[in-house]
Image (tube, grey):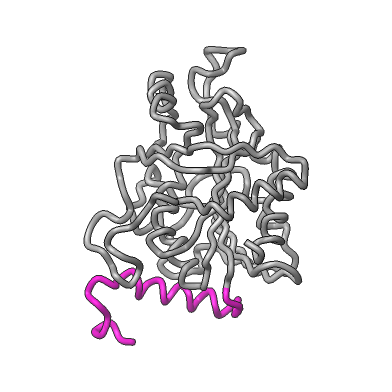
């Protein structure tokens, strides 16, 4: 299709087609499941045998990751059992200066590659008292406190409908499956509401008190726009937060404790084995969900 024949609002659709062709030149299988890996959790993508790894720099129109703990690769694998997987090893954030199209570009690409199920993961600060560093939280719902929505502007009908129902942002059957797998593995997996803020500053204690009042259980700087874009594209979503720190003002042993990204990455790496086992178990049982 030539550019002149494209719908005038389909510039990103044309770019996505170019990127998908570049990926399919290396990996010809349709992709069943997409996984976006958060800070310190990227090692999961390295657990697949015979995987194809493409640096973002080799993909036309693809943004570049700038955050420590985000490798900047698309890793694809076709395991002997279970679904075909594409792992986004390095996401994009508003705080990096990226706009709507860039932040959601990986989700749009995954849709082009055939993905019907998306697993989003992130590092988050625990607000609820029982969410301590190293805990895994299954996301039941989300609060968009970023001050932005990736669907603002003229709608591109090639990507999804104008208005999107977010009443079930996180798929109930997928959450049930995750709980079953966690129980089989003896892994504690509590459910909670994830709140997304724009960052890059961590929240103040007053902001955390506000978010707790609003019903947030954990807080971070990602995920929300990706989930909105996924639902816009008709992709069902499962979300898991790795709690890497207590949110501001909630550290009972040291009220003056500071927050830093190194702690986020280190905690993600420490919980990697438990996290990877949970994800692998979910993937193995996904065809039944």
Asked if the stretch drawn in magenta spans residue 17, the answer is yes
Q: Is residue 158 above or below residue 105?
A: below
Residue at 64% x, 50% y: name it: 178
Judging depth in this view, the residue of 200 and 145 nearest the camera is 145
Tell me which residue sits at (73%, 44%) in the image: 183
Vertical side of 271 occupied by 75: above or below: below
Q: Is residue 260 above or below residue 31?
A: above
Q: Which residues are magenta?
A: 1-30
Check if residue 209 falls in the magenta segment: no
Which one is in front, 96 or 219?
219
Point out residue 213 in the picture as x, y percentages from the top left corner.
40, 24
Q: Residue at x 35, y 40 (%)?
A: 146
Where in the figure is residue 198, as x and y percent of width and height? 38, 39
Identify the residue at image location x=50%, y=64%: 57
**How many discs mark residues in the rendered view?**
0
Where is residue 286 drawn, in percent x and y?
Answer: 65, 62
Direction from residue 141 to residue 150 in the image, left or right: left
Q: Quadrant of the N terminus?
A: bottom left
Q: Position of residue 166 (x, y in %)?
A: 38, 51
Question: Split into 4 quadrants, where in the image is the C terminus?
Answer: bottom right
Using the image as rendered, state which of residue 274 and residue 236 is in the foreground. Answer: 236
């Amino acid at each position: 299709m030539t550019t002149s024949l494209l719908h005038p609002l389909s510039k990103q659709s044309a770019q996505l087609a170019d990127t998908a062709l570049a990926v399919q030149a290396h990996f010809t299988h349709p992709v069943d499941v997409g996984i976006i890996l958060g800070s310190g959790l990227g090692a999961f993508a390295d657990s697949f045998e015979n995987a194809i790894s493409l640096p973002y720099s080799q993909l036309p129109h693809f943004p570049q990751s700038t955050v420590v703990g985000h490798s900047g690769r698309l890793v694809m694998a076709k395991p002997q059992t279970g679904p075909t997987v594409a792992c986004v090893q390095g996401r994009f954030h508003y705080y990096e200066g990226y706009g709507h199209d860039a932040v959601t570009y990986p989700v749009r690409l995954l849709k082009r590659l055939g993905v019907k199920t998306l697993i989003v993961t992130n590092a988050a600060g625990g607000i609820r008292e029982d969410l301590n560093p190293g805990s895994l939280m299954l996301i039941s719902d989300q609060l968009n406190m970023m001050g932005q929505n990736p669907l603002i502007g003229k709608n591109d009908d090639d990507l999804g409908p104008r208005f999107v129902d977010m009443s079930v942002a996180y798929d109930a059957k997928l959450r049930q499956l995750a709980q079953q797998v966690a129980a089989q593995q003896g892994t504690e997996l509590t459910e909670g509401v994830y709140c997304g803020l724009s960052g890059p500053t961590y929240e103040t204690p007053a902001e955390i008190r506000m978010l707790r009042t609003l019903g947030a259980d954990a807080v971070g700087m990602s995920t929300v726009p990706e989930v909105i874009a996924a639902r816009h594209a008709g992709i069902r979503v499962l979300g898991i937060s790795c709690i890497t720190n207590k949110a501001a003002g909630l550290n009972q042993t040291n009220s003056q404790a500071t927050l830093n990204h190194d702690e986020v990455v280190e905690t993600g790496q420490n919980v990697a084995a438990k996290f990877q086992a949970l994800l692998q178990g979910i993937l193995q049982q996904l065809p039944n969900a």
